[in-house]
Image (spheres, coloured by chain):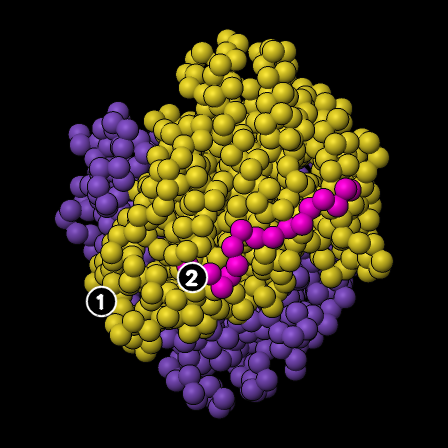
Chain colours: A yellow, B purple
């Protein structure tokens, strides 16, 4: 099997206007970026008339393990499978973050014969959306310190500036800094730091905004700090909102690309799935639903984080009604959940597999709590055995009442996902779904967190530091009690302890911090160690990345 | 007269493929960015066969004053004027920096009826080149700290890391920081800081590179710091060069846009004119020379800095042979050089004008030292009087032997610069130019600086701190003695004191610091206070910038 990059390079791409035409997008709505990428102006699309919105299909997964699940490849494969069986399908994915590409080798545009292309551009600067978000965020940061410098009319408490700066780079040296050093001309020294751009609240806002006006209103609500008498200070108070909107104006248009098989795909936005909600932009999803009959989209991490936030934050806020959810698993990953070490995954182990199915089972039960019908996609690996596949089939049918499909899109493209496509389309067409969020917005914040912990994580409860009790009360009093809660915890376990594989129960979720993302419209509950600025490894991929003698990029994928 | 943005918006732009066709660029060489911008792949251009390179015309200016000169508008107007008189002309300009747009109101894409368009995109993210340069620079910075973190095999002295970080933002809080705080997991705390992206050595390298291989070789030569025993450590030692090249791969292609009158224009690269050389990219200039018969380009600041560096650094290194130089002046600015206060510029003042002509005269004499024939363009302002124009004409003809042309491109577009176009074309066609740099590369560094100071600035000499004597010797010993010297001093005067208008003589230029830009290929001699990270003013333009109800950007220009 050739490598991802070899497959991508060997593909003959269709001009982006042809892909747009296939999706029903007129050429007037296209703003091309090179030959194979275009931004789409949603306002230039024809009125979709009586066409009902397409069916929204979420691709999520079991709790991730080092063995890999293949959520993005399954999203792409399913889209191609739907196209192959004659459905009008589109895909809506997140944009990859630039920084991490230089740490560990590996792109984020699918793999094997299930990729979105052109992969180099998508994985590098693409259409510059993340750079625009970085600029908008850092303009706000510069205006805050500038406000303080020129007299601090808003009386900001410099010990409590909530907005850090951002950079789309893995750079641990910037996690914690002291800024404004060097004398009076450089301002008032204070503690500061940088997050990676995907952790920016501006990124979360960008992905939840329903249009330019909503974007600007949300930007204005970002809480940048507080005064010494604890009044909150917002980005609107700093008068940064208009300029930030200007920086984000073009970025807000969804990016159209294609899969290797020519299925139209929006790749747009990409917030972190820990301290943010981890889904592509609402604008891209809504635009795709107007155009296609089936829209396949993806959420970050496992279903406990990604699907829960997709439902409780993105779908609730944007009024989306998902029709079905595909839960991706692999035999290898299930065996890891059952206790097998990474170097022993090549051997058949039905006992461990059965134990590991507890993880899948919990996610299936959880998804049903949102009124969305699930289906299981087993992403096939060469070492899988027939007995292992049979065990999963029987367990899912007998114990969970859910269908499983073996998928071979990685090796075979859309042809390898045709069965999945047929079953997913049938499930969505059944109109079985009756989407409801897990909790009402009226529920107090603390109870929302308890509900997620008990209902989704199988926890016995949440431990809250006494200091944070007051913080809950403060947020409720300030009028933020109606916001959903966005949990930041490890993606590797239902618990806050990443080593607890399978389906731990009765554990206690330790709340360490509450952060307000008033612009995005959620309260972040940080449970455990969450890294918002990654570092580079001992031998970063960057050391091997280069342009070869033929002008091709090597070492990036 | 409507505002710049009103004029730009009222214009009917030609599709970028039509502009490309006019310049002889085939559609295969175009990579569009929206409808009116494209990147050009120089390798996809047809062999220009027997066509000799076009004539290269530099637009430079007297020492800038708050009254304004209009160098960019004159560059655009001259290009349009040449087109109007039937010449095959192109323009090559620098890209504007994003950060400063949010400080003081005003774009950098010309003005009045002499603009390059689409002005909003050009002044904002454009094709993302500056973002790519920022990413490449900061990747190197992250890899340096990562190298130290993982054992510091190169034995870098953390007190002497020479590479700062960059951001395309006016943010004084980042000028001086302490990084890697917060404990062992975040690295070894050290002093650090940010420059604005246009001050990055990567920017200077990008603009001097003659192709991808040269770019990579130059990036590898960046000196990032030294060991405790004073061995220099380079970007190649850090193994960052390949990945940096990958980040800059697309950016390296020149950006094609158009003037309001449809003259093709490359807008590409934009290094600072103080600590770097201040010209657009060599690749854009060379590509334009292959395509057009006349290429009009611009250098930063006044001719003492911009033209000197254009000749001694850019032209010398790239083997360019300029055919003529246009020195832009205004009656108002000349009167300021003659001692008139800004609020009194509206009154005719022949005596002050005559005094101020000393500044123009020095620049004319200087340009002739490079063997390039000059011509003076007086950028017309409404308050100018006939007597003032006559005085300039007579002075230039009688004392300098140089022609002057009154230009009205700002108010009239190319029609207002037709006379200038005819005279410049005639001057260039005379083949009078015999370009030679001011000094040979073999001259010792200190003597190069003395030569520039005496010959160009009219200085009596250079004062060198005894510590810096050793630094000169160190650079010569390390093999950097052959590099040209890039002087960073105030642009407002021939002297290092910005208040000395006109043509001061016998002053002493105080050398404060020597910095090695080994990748760009010059030694920076810092003379006076040079700011490499601007701040925002008390009421930044950003506070008024917004998207209006019709979706137009307001407040930026």
Residue range highlighted in magenta: A429-445
Kindly identify which numbered label has been placed on residue B270: none
Residue A408 in the image: above or below residue A132:
above
Q: Residue at x 41, y 16 (%)?
A: A341
Q: Secondary structure at mark 1?
A: helix
Residue B551 falls in image quadrant: bottom right
Q: Residue at x 47, y 44 (%)?
A: A455
- Quick check: is A531 in the magenta stretch? no
Q: Secondary structure at mark 2?
A: loop
Kindly identify which numbered label has been placed on residue A184: 1
The answer to whether B400 appears left or right of A400 in the picture is left
> Which corner quadrant holds the C terminus of chain A?
top right
Magenta region's main secondary structure? Answer: loop
User: Label 2 marks which chain's residue?
Assistant: A
- Quick check: is A440 in the magenta stretch? yes
**Residue B60 screen position, x and y as percent:** 51, 61
Q: Are marks 2 and 1 in contact (CB under 8 Å)?
A: no
**Residue A237 screen position, x and y as percent:** 42, 74
Quickly name the residue at label 2: A444
């Amino acid at each position: 099997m050739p490598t991802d990059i070899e497959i991508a390079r060997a593909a003959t791409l269709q001009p982006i206007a042809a892909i747009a035409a296939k999706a029903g997008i007129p050429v007037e709505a296209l703003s091309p970026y090179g030959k194979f990428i275009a931004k789409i102006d949603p306002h230039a699309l024809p009125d979709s008339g009586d066409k009902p919105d397409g069916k929204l299909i979420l691709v999520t997964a079991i709790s991730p393990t080092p063995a890999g699940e293949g959520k993005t490849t399954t999203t792409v494969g399913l889209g191609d499978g739907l196209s192959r069986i004659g459905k009008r399908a589109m895909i809506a994915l997140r944009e990859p973050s630039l920084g991490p590409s230089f740490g560990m080798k590996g792109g984020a545009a699918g793999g094997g014969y299930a990729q979105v292309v052109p992969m180099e551009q998508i994985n590098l600067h693409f259409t510059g959306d993340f750079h625009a978000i970085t600029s908008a965020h850092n303009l706000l940061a510069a205006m805050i310190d500038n406000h303080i410098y020129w007299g601090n009319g808003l009386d900001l408490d410099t010990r409590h500036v909530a907005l850090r700066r951002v950079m789309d780079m893995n750079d641990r040296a910037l996690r914690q800094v002291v800024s404004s050093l060097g004398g009076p001309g450089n301002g008032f020294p204070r503690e500061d730091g940088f997050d990676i751009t995907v952790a920016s609240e501006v990124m979360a806002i960008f992905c939840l905004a329903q249009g330019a006006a909503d974007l600007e209103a949300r930007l204005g609500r970002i809480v940048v700090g507080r005064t010494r008498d604890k009044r909150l200070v917002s980005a609107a108070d700093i008068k940064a909102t208009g300029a930030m909107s200007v920086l984000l104006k073009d970025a807000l248009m969804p990016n159209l690309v294609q899969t290797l098989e020519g299925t139209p795909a929006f790749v747009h936005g990409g917030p972190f799935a820990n301290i943010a909600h981890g889904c592509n932009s609402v604008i891209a999803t809504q635009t795709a639903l107007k155009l296609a009959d089936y829209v396949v989209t993806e959420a970050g991490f496992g279903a406990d984080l990604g699907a829960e936030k997709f439902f409780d934050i993105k779908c609730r806020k944007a009024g989306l009604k998902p029709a079905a959810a595909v839960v991706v698993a692999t035999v290898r990953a299930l065996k890891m959940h059952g206790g097998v070490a990474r170097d022993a995954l090549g051997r058949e182990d039905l006992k461990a597999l059965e134990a590991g199915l507890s993880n899948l089972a919990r996610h299936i039960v959880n998804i049903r709590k949102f009124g969305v019908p699930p289906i299981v996609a087993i992403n096939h690996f060469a070492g899988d055995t027939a007995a292992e596949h049979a065990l999963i089939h029987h367990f899912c049918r007998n114990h969970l009442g859910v269908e499983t499909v073996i998928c071979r899109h990685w090796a075979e493209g859309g042809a390898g996902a045709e069965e999945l496509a047929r079953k997913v389309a049938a499930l969505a067409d059944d109109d079985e779904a009756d989407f409801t969020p897990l909790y009402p917005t009226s529920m107090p914040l603390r109870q929302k967190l308890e509900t997620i912990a008990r209902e989704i994580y199988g926890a016995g409860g949440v431990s809250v530091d006494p200091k944070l009790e007051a913080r809950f009360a403060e947020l409720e009093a300030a009028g933020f009690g109606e916001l959903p809660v966005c949990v930041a915890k490890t993606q590797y376990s239902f618990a806050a302890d990443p080593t607890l594989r399978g389906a731990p129960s009765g554990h206690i979720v330790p709340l360490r911090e509450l952060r307000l993302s008033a612009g995005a419209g959620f309260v972040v509950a940080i449970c455990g160690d969450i890294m918002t600025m990654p570092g580079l490894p001992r031998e970063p991929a960057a050391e091997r990345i280069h342009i070869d003698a033929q002008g091709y990029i090597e070492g990036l994928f």
